[in-house]
Image (cartoon, rainbow, N blue to C red):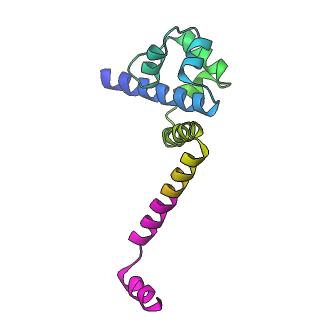
């Protein structure tokens, strides 16, 4: 029973975090909007470590422009998209030079990934063309 409760808290926390990021709010901004005085406490809710009352859940849903039911659903896409939104938030804090470095890093990663998936027979053909 405790595991189910913990899993449920994680689902709710992931959904809140995803929708908070999608709405462009920081942890402290959303926490204050729904009456929390500590970003730390709210962060524990988002990370599934603390539970949340029904009243607070309704307030969060209202601020995020959604229904409580949406916060209760297990949506695996939210988890994947949350990582992307967190990365975007971090990139926004960088200066133009640093953003360029991130862009080049990503291009290099993609190029390496494409090289890994080239079959040995295709490599030989590519090498012959060079």
In the picture as drawn, the residue positioned furthest to the bottom comes out as 128
Examine the image and state in which quarter residue 18 appears. top right
In the picture as drawn, the residue positioned furthest to the front comes out as 97
Return the x and y of residue 47 as percentages of the image width and height: 42, 25
Q: Residue at x 55, y 12 (%)?
A: 56
Residue 1 visible in image: no
Residue situated in front as seen by the camera: 49 or 37 = 37
Residue situated in front as seen by the camera: 18 or 86 = 86
Q: How many marks?
A: 0
Question: Which region of the structure is painted magenta?
Answer: 107-129
Q: Residue at x 49, y 16 (%)?
A: 39
Instruction: Inspect the magenta stretch and tell me whether residue 69 lies in it.
Output: no
Q: Residue at x 68, y 24 (%)?
A: 65
Q: Is 87 situated above or below 66?
A: below
Return the x and y of residue 83 as percentages of the image width and height: 49, 40
Dominant secondary structure (helix, strand or loop) of the stretch shown in magenta: helix
Residue 113 visible in image: yes
Instruction: Inspect the magenta stretch and tell me whether residue 111 lies in it.
Output: yes
Quarter in which the N terminus is drawn: top left
Residue situated in front as seen by the camera: 81 or 74 = 81
Q: Is 58 situated above or below 4?
A: above
In the picture as drawn, the residue positioned furthest to the left comes out as 2
Q: Is residue 105 left or right of residue 34?
A: left
Q: Is 112 situated above or below 4?
A: below
Return the x and y of residue 100 as percentages of the image width and height: 57, 52
Q: Is residue 23 left or right of residue 126?
A: right
């Amino acid at each position: 029973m405790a595991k189910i409760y913990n899993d449920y808290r994680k689902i709710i926390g992931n959904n809140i975090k995803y929708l908070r990021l999608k709405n462009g709010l920081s942890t402290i901004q959303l926490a204050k909007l729904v009456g929390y005085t500590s970003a730390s406490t709210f962060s524990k809710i988002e990370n599934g470590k603390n539970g949340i009352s029904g009243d607070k859940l309704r307030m969060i849903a209202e601020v995020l422009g959604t229904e409580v039911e949406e916060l209760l659903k297990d949506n695996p896409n939210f988890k994947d998209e949350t990582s992307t939104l967190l990365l975007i938030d971090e990139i926004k804090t960088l200066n133009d030079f640093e953003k360029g470095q991130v862009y080049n890093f990503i291009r290099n990663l993609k190029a390496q990934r494409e090289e890994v998936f080239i079959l040995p027979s295709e490599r030989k053909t590519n090498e012959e063309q060079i």
